[in-house]
Image (cartoon, grey):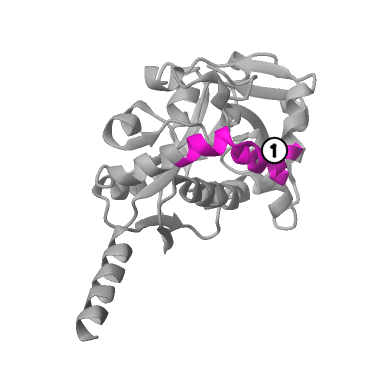
Amino acid sequence: MKKLLLSLLALFSLSVQAALTVRIPLPEPAPPLYPYYRQLLTLALEKSGEDFAIDQVALNEPQQRLAQRLLEGKTVNLLWMGTSGEYEQTLLPVLIPLLRGLSGFRLLLINQTRQQDFSRVQSLGELATFIGVQGIGWSDIDILKQAGLNISAAPRDTILDMLNRNQHVDYYPRSLVEAHAELAATTGHYPLLMAEPRLLLHYPFAIYFFVSPEYPELAEALKRGLTLAYTDGSFMTLFEQYPPIRASLPVLQQPRLRLELANPFMNESSRRVPAQYWHPAARP
């Protein structure tokens, strides 16, 4: 009996050790799409067939610092981020766009008192006379600057307050999904914010799961799980039924002035991602 118990304990220990432990940051306050990415992560891991546990680590740090932590693989071993050549070379990207490329469509969050100023913008050159803002270390800063736009960087949790006070910055390019979710969640705190109703920026862009190089088995499991989720339709069910995504899609049909930006920083690996993983309007 003692030998049997020891054997069962050993088997249990091995099963626990074999389970994938996923460590992700939990910022405060959480970004508007955090629940979506969290649900998608769970779906992918379930579809992978692996046993898993997800640990949320309380961290409020810029993306660059989180990416460094991910490279080391100690505090966290998975992030979802806008892609860049550097991230794809140093980390393990799971090359399935989590927002199907909709992250490249950008509405401008502005202070309502500035709407008349923005109503006169007809080109990227005219938009460049205003000061845009992005979070520190975000991948799309280089894309926006390469297009000639005047872009500053600030801590994510200070940006909406600066806009609401009409201080330091003029507009905040947010993906059309994030813009709707963020405005809905913060109306009471920042009543002067609005989505500029006439302009829409677009550039090829993707948000991926990135995994620490120390955890290749996790990257493989996520790739397998996301692929299966596409095959059986569960990815698209989550995507199409998630309220902020569903609410944002009609923006693509609106008669907006679309300002197209190139993305010279997009790797060839991203350009080769199969068309089925992109929204038809967002394919590179």
| Residue 64 visible in image | no
Relative to 68, say whether 206 is above or below: above
**SS type, badge 1:** helix
The magenta stretch spans residue 232: yes
In the displayed orientation, state which residue is furthest to the front: 1
Please tell me which residue is depicted at 55% across the width and 56% down the height of the picture: 30
Which of the pair 194/69 is nearer the observer? Answer: 69
Which region of the structure is painted magenta?
225-247
Residue 54 x %, y %: 43, 59
Q: Is residue 92 left or right of residue 185?
A: left
Which amino acid, by three-letter code, is at mark 1? Glu
Residue 15 x %, y %: 32, 63
At label 1, counting other C-alpha atoms closer than 10 Å, the crowd grade (few under 14, some 14-19, many 20 or more) is some
Residue 71 x %, y %: 27, 44
Residue 62 x %, y %: 41, 48
**Residue hosting label 1:** 240
Please tell me which residue is depicted at 61% across the width and 41% down the height of the picture: 234
